[in-house]
Image (spheres, helix red, strand yellow):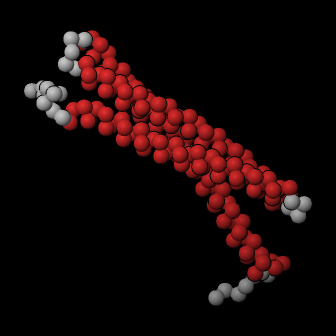
Amino acid sequence: MPVDSAQNPFALLTLVAAPALLTNATSVLALSTVNRILRSGDRMRALSAQLDDPKTNAKKREFLLAQVGRVEKQALLQLRGLHSIYIALGCFASAVIISILGASLAESSFRTLFMLMAVLGLTVGVVGVAGLVWGSVKLFHATRISIQNITEEAALIRQREAEQQHPLGQIAPPS
């Protein structure tokens, strides 16, 4: 049995709360993504400084250049993710307005306009969710690249430590 929206105070709240909650969550994700892009820029400048150092040997230069390529790819993935997140943010904000307008038409004689608003609100909401999911996928791929760089840096640090503890290939006796 359908419930009259005038008798159900949660109807309008639900129509507005879901897109508003998604808008808030997406805004936080957009903010953190911007910070990640800025950190990628910081990392690129640090790599550039290391490459400019005349003491950097050929092996380390090759290692750093590989990281430059990955950091660039990571930043581009983050930017694509941010584009999708911004689309999602616009869609969710639009869905709030559409939901409010649609709810105001629910009890009116403008049935066709009400149905159009319902379809439009749903469509915009679905596009928003798709943008949020696609942006999250791009950020996941960017994170994988970051982890690859961190893993290689850790291996290089361990190798350097081992070489400093056992110079000229001397192997320590087993403990």
In depth, the one of 162 and 94 nearer the eye is 94
Q: Nearer the viewer, residue 64 or 85?
A: 85
Q: Residue 134 location, x and y as percent?
A: 49, 36
Q: Residue 19, position in %: x, y?
A: 36, 35
Specify whether 16 is left or right of 35.
left
Q: In which quarter of the image is residue 15?
A: top left
Query: Does the image show residue 95?
Result: yes
Residue at image position (80%, 53%) is 48
Q: Can residue 66 be seen at all in this image of the molecule?
A: no
* As drawn, 3 above or below 61: above
- Which residue is the extreme one toward the right? 54
The quarter in which the N terminus is drawn is: top left
Can you say which quadrant of the picture contains the C terminus?
bottom right
Instruction: Note whether 52 is above or below 172 in the view shown.
Output: above
The residue shown at (47%, 42%) is 27
**Residue found 60% across the figure and 49% down from its top:** 36
Q: In this view, does 68 lie to the left or right of 30?
A: right
